[in-house]
Image: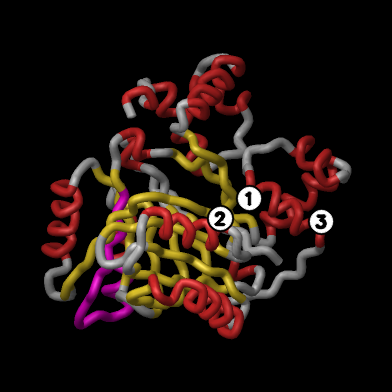
Amino acid sequence: MENNKIKLDKRNLKILEILDFNARVTYADIAKKVKISKQAVEQRIKKLERKKIISSYYLLVDISKLGYSAHRIALKLQNTSQEKQKEITNYLMTQKNIGWLFELGGKWDLAITIYSKNLIDLEEISKKLTHKFSQYIKEKSISTILYFYNFPNKFLFNSKENKKIKIGGDLIKNKIDKIDSNILLELSKNSRQSILKISEKLKQNPKTILYRIKRLEKNKIIVGYRADINTKLLEYDQYKIFLYLKNITKQIEEKIIEYLRNIKNSVYLTSAIGIADLEFELKVKNSEELYSIIEKLRQKFKNYFKDFETLFIRKEIIISYFPET
């Protein structure tokens, strides 16, 4: 682990802060904000990539604008070796429309997010998985995600920036053609790659690619571009917290959501039908920091706080916001 560490000076942190919520910003624009040369910015970013501080650059697609909803399957495994669990995750990596795949610590061992246009598609994927690995699945839970928010890594930059990106809501079927689909696919592989590179891969005029990306943004299909910052190398752990509430009203729920959004360690917030009333994710230095945040939340909303459950996110295997259309 020591060999993978990199000293994050103020300029590196500023570069990461810029890329965190805008992975397509140019070297020249970053240079103006950081007040160093374009070449120096490029060198620093390449070094951050080599050291795996930046793992990848990914695209944020609002799947609801393509007529998809997100469903999550949580699995508790049994009678598995490391090799068998690897076989299960390798199988899931080959399946279509898997959005997120995580290894967990706690009540559940694996969490899988599936994008589907209807419940029949979801049932087919779920049954296929269950039939193939039934003897290794002790328990399974399925929930439907209504919407979720992405928040910047404020804790890392000591930033008060209160940005958010919402994904989900009412399903709207926007028609996209093969070229649009291929553009989204390329950006989902690397959201920072240039217009020229995409045009060469797809054998399209760069102006066509640029126009179509702008149209996808205007139609709110593309809602963001992010750098995947490997905060584990910076000694932060990630946890998912399930909140169980009582005496709740819409107004109180909105206040809780706003409170959670303003926690500097909060990186995701989810509203789902299934496991809990609200879910959020934190990146923290240790368990003491985790439970301190939860205790403050409990005291703030003690009349509405019933219980909570935490899951340790051990490993992120897949993160993709683009379903194969």
Q: Rounded to the nearest whole Å, what is the CA distance between mark 3 and mark 1?
A: 14 Å
Residue of label 1 = 188
Verify CB contact (< 8 Å) between mark 1 and mark 2.
Answer: yes
Q: Secondary structure at mark 1?
A: helix
Quadrant position of the N terminus in the picture = top left
Q: Which residues are magenta?
A: 238-255
Label 2 is placed on what type of residue?
Ser
Instruction: Identify the residue at image location x=32%, y=70%.
Output: 278
Between 160 and 182, which is closer to the camera in this rendering?
182
Residue of label 2 = 320
Residue 179: which numbered mark, if any? 3
Label 3 is placed on what type of residue?
Ile
Q: Nearer the viewer, mark 3 or mark 2?
A: 2
Q: Is residue 239 magenta?
A: yes
Instruction: Identify the residue at image location x=33%, y=33%.
Output: 234
Locate residue 253: give its quadrant. bottom left
First in sequence: mark 3 vs mark 2: 3
Locate residue 279: give its quadrant. bottom left
Label 1 is placed on what type of residue?
Ser
Rendering coords of residue 305 (x, y %): 17, 72
Left or right, 291 with respect to 119, comes to left
Q: Rounded to the nearest whole Å, what is the CA distance between mark 3 and mark 2?
A: 19 Å
Which residue is situated farthest in the bottom direction here?
A: 120
Instruction: Identify the residue at image location x=52%, y=80%.
Output: 127
Q: Secondary structure at mark 3?
A: helix
